[in-house]
Amino acid sequence: MTDNKNINMQDVWQQDKDHYIHPWTDFSTFKETGSMILTDSDNVHVTDGEGRKYLDGIGGLWCVNIGYARKEMAEAIAEQIMKIPYYSSFGHHTTIPAAQLAAKLAELAPGNLNHVFYGCGGSVANDTAVRMIHFYFNQLGKKSKKKIISRIDGYHGSTYMAMSITGVKFDHIGFDIEEELVHHISCPNPYRRPAEQSLEEFCDEKVQELEDKILELGPDNVAVFFAEPIMGAGGVIVPPKGYHKRTLDVCHKYDVLYVSDEVVTAFGRLGHMFASEDEFGIVPDMITCAKGLTSGYLPLGATIISEKIYDVISKPQADGALFTHGYTYSGHPVSCAAGIKNIEIMERENICGHVKDMGAYFEEQVKSLIDLPIVGDVRGRKFMMCIENVANKETKELINPDAKVGNRIADHCQARGLIVRPLAHMNVLSPPLTLTKEHIDFLVATLRESIEATMADLK
Ligand code: PLP
């Protein structure tokens, strides 16, 4: 534990409330309640400014794969700072960690995804994918191939382009998005399919919808399809069996690139370094990743691309075009050193193996909550799960939004020493991957109690 005794938490609370614009915040409640201050952490627990300890059921925000407060991470980061804390990699400069991590990612990524571009998070990794793909088709002389297809309830980030690709309609309210380039198709959510439709028919319909959209926009105008292997922030939606492979085939039939957004699913959350191939059997044209790449210890994102795309974008360009894309912090040596150490820890401790065992137990235990009267669906895989609360399990009718059921459950959990994420009427779980059986038993028992307490509130 760090020593915070000289810090007045009331002052911090006030400074935060007066001056810090929080991301993704409901200001009406924020202005009343201010923030919960997190001061310390250890493995799967965090501590607040009043010394209360919580099991963190969400890994901060789909992060902290190797657990909190790893001394080795602090040492690797400090060591790199004392060697060289920063250098730009524009043009022909590099640093040891940037080069070594790129080679490691090329080794771990599926197929011939062998080339890595760095940014500082997931949104930027997806923006980079768009710019690279446009550049790629321009260089091939296919200048009309620009349009982007993504899914309703897909989440791809919060920069202008990444938010336009995002299909969570709630997130667009009050903002503008790019509507000329980006087109959404429906969400492959098996829970919300019509009652009479089989999973196979549902899958056929969703795959056909992608093909129809490409044909409607014109294959010569469509550049890319963006898809998360499991849709995270949209409610942990696992598409039906065969969907990934069949949508990839449709894309390739029309020379449309497939970007697998693995910002959440990579680095162990499903028991693999990358889920696209190992969990779902596809090798996309690009993978974007962030979060688990450093376990969130430092900001870093990566866009990993195939040999085919690299060959085109790295050729001398006839019209004099240079690859004018990059950020001051692309390949930041300290973030890359954190990435290398994080992957080293994951491999040495066989975190993916642990997730295959303990994640399976977690999934089974969380799924046991389905017997509760307001739990309509429990879905996800391993350490990526979601509980959907409903008013009627038969009709799947939603609970009145004014009841804020997701928030209520999260509040009850918090009062009992557990953090879960409310997402409208749902609750999402994405804990550190180091969770043990005892942690899981506590988490699931607390969640059950909190859902029961919420049911009593709603009576
Ligand atoms: N893509 C996915 C699938 C995500 O879940 C997120 C963030 O949660 C992002 C992209 C955006 O990442 P960042 O917030 O690091 O920009």
Image (cartoon, rainbow, N blue to C red):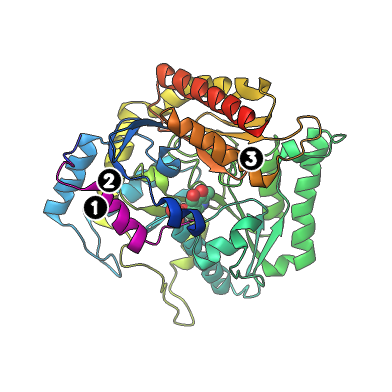
Q: Position of residue 120 (x, y in %)?
A: 37, 57
Amino acid type at mark 1: Val
Local SS, label 2: helix
Q: Is residue 221 left or right of residue 441?
A: right
Separation of disc 3 and disc 2 at Cα?
A: 30 Å
Q: Are marks 1 and 2 in contact (CB under 8 Å)?
A: yes
* Residue matched to label 1: 334
Separation of disc 3 and disc 1 at Cα?
A: 34 Å
* Residue matched to label 2: 338
Q: Position of residue 326 (x, y in %)?
A: 38, 68
Q: Which residues are magenta?
A: 4-25
Q: Position of residue 112 (x, y in %)?
A: 48, 48
Residue visible at 79% across and 50% down in the picture: 208
Separation of disc 1 and disc 2 at Cα?
A: 6 Å
Q: Say whether residue 16 is magenta.
A: yes
Q: Position of residue 110 (x, y in %)?
A: 49, 42
Q: Nearer the viewer, residue 448 or 282?
A: 448
* Residue matched to label 3: 237
Crowding at mark 2 (Cα within 10 Å: few <14, some 14-19, many 20+): many
Local SS, label 3: loop
Up-down: is 98 above or below 203? below
Chain-order first, disc 3 or disc 1: 3
Q: Say whether residue 219 is magenta.
A: no
Q: Is residue 272 left or right of residue 87?
A: right
Chain-order first, disc 3 or disc 2: 3
Up-down: is 236 above or below 445? below
Q: Nearer the viewer, residue 178 or 137?
A: 178
Q: Quadrant of residue 393?
A: top right
Amino acid type at mark 3: Ile
Location of the C terminus by quadrant is top right
Crowding at mark 3 (Cα within 10 Å: few <14, some 14-19, many 20+): many
